[in-house]
Image (cartoon, helix red, strand yellow):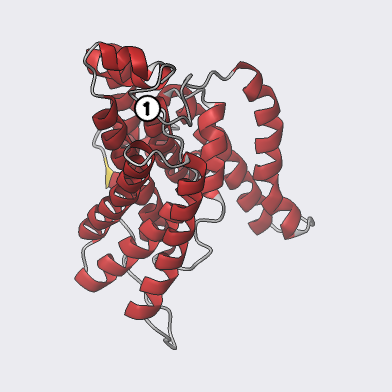
């Protein structure tokens, strides 16, 4: 492959954790529940995904368990803020710290202190016949592991569900005006619970992607701020799947450019190169917040007996 195709392939892979975590944030947010626990849930998903894959020898089982753990934390956020009406930001931070601590604890319990770093096989590439032979971009787009294709299908599927189905319209109405949605018979509580659970599952898979695709092992710094950037990316994308995908592509491009510059031996301190994605994020967000429209009821708890919701 030429250099352009290599960069394109690396960028597509790099955008997956951003994309899945941001779509998970978006899904709960469209129902009015705003999560700030992404970094912790992704780290826990990475830990659980690695440990289960290491113990069972199956990456598929590791991914599924990571998704289940993420769904559990997402459901906990939805339940605490819907049934108990606790502050969403406070609950989200509590879940972030709980997931972060649990991730490291599980690794120490299962693996402990070892002389050599335990490894698992990373996910193999699955080439799509005919499409991979397209000149220039065929290999870059159609020669990836299953999670890359999964992320693409989730993006398209969510766009279709949200903007081409009645159920998607009902979901968005819960985040805009839950009182009106409730009066029309739309189950506000149930919607908030399932969206936060599915959103948490996507965050868990985003975390599991890192050891099962990138490194083959787990470290406590493996997420590297991607969870926090996912929050910014969701705002940047205006809470719409297609724009979030475009933003994830931009963030991933910044990551890959910084990495390639570092390995190519450019005489620039590595710390400067590592900060490039974050600086780019700040610059983009300055302009994005001017036009980004968030769900009207985002971050607010719904009280059926309240006059204002």
Q: Quadrant of residue 293?
A: top right
Q: Is residue 160 visible?
A: no
Identity of the residue drawn at 50% across and 31% down: 234
Q: Is residue 76 visible?
A: yes
Q: Secondary structure at mark 1?
A: loop
Q: Position of residue 150 (x, y in %)?
A: 29, 39
Mark 1 Cα within 10 Å, few/some/many (few <14, many 20+)? some
Identity of the residue drawn at 32% across and 78% down: 110
From the viewer's perspective, is residue 185 above or below residue 255?
above
Identity of the residue drawn at 58% across and 46% down: 256
Report whether 172 appears left or right of 294.
left
Which residue is more in the foreground, 107 or 13? 107
Q: Position of residue 25 (x, y in %)?
A: 43, 36
Q: Quadrant of residue 130?
A: top left
Q: How many marks?
A: 1
Residue picked out by circle 1: 303
């Amino acid at each position: 492959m030429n250099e352009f195709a290599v960069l394109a392939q690396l960028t597509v892979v790099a955008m997956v954790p951003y994309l899945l975590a941001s779509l998970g944030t978006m899904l709960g947010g469209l129902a009015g529940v705003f999560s700030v626990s992404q970094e912790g849930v992704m780290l826990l998903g990475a830990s659980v995904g690695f440990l289960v894959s290491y113990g069972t020898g199956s990456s598929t089982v590791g991914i599924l368990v990571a998704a289940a753990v993420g769904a559990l934390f997402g459901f906990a956020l939805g339940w605490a803020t819907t049934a108990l009406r606790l502050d969403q930001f406070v609950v989200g931070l509590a879940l972030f710290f709980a997931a972060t601590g649990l991730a490291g604890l599980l690794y120490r319990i299962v693996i402990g202190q070892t002389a050599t770093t335990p490894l698992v096989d990373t996910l193999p590439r699955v080439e799509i016949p005919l499409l991979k032979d397209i000149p220039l971009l065929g290999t870059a787009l159609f020669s990836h592991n299953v999670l890359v294709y999964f992320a693409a299908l989730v993006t398209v599927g969510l766009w279709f569900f949200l903007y081409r189905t009645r159920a998607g319209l009902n979901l968005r109405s819960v985040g805009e005006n839950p009182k009106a949605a409730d009066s029309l018979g739309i189950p506000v509580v149930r919607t908030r619970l399932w969206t936060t659970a599915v959103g948490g599952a996507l965050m868990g898979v985003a975390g599991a992607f890192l050891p099962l695709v990138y490194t083959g092992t787990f470290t406590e710094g493996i997420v590297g701020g991607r969870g926090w950037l996912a929050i910014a990316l969701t705002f940047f994308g205006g809470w719409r799947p297609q724009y979030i995908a475009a933003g994830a592509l931009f963030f991933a491009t910044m990551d890959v450019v910084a990495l390639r510059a570092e390995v190519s031996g450019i005489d620039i301190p590595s710390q400067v190169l590592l900060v490039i994605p974050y600086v780019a994020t700040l610059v983009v967000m300055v302009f994005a917040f001017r036009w980004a429209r968030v769900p009207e009821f985002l971050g607010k708890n719904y009280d059926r007996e309240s006059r204002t919701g």
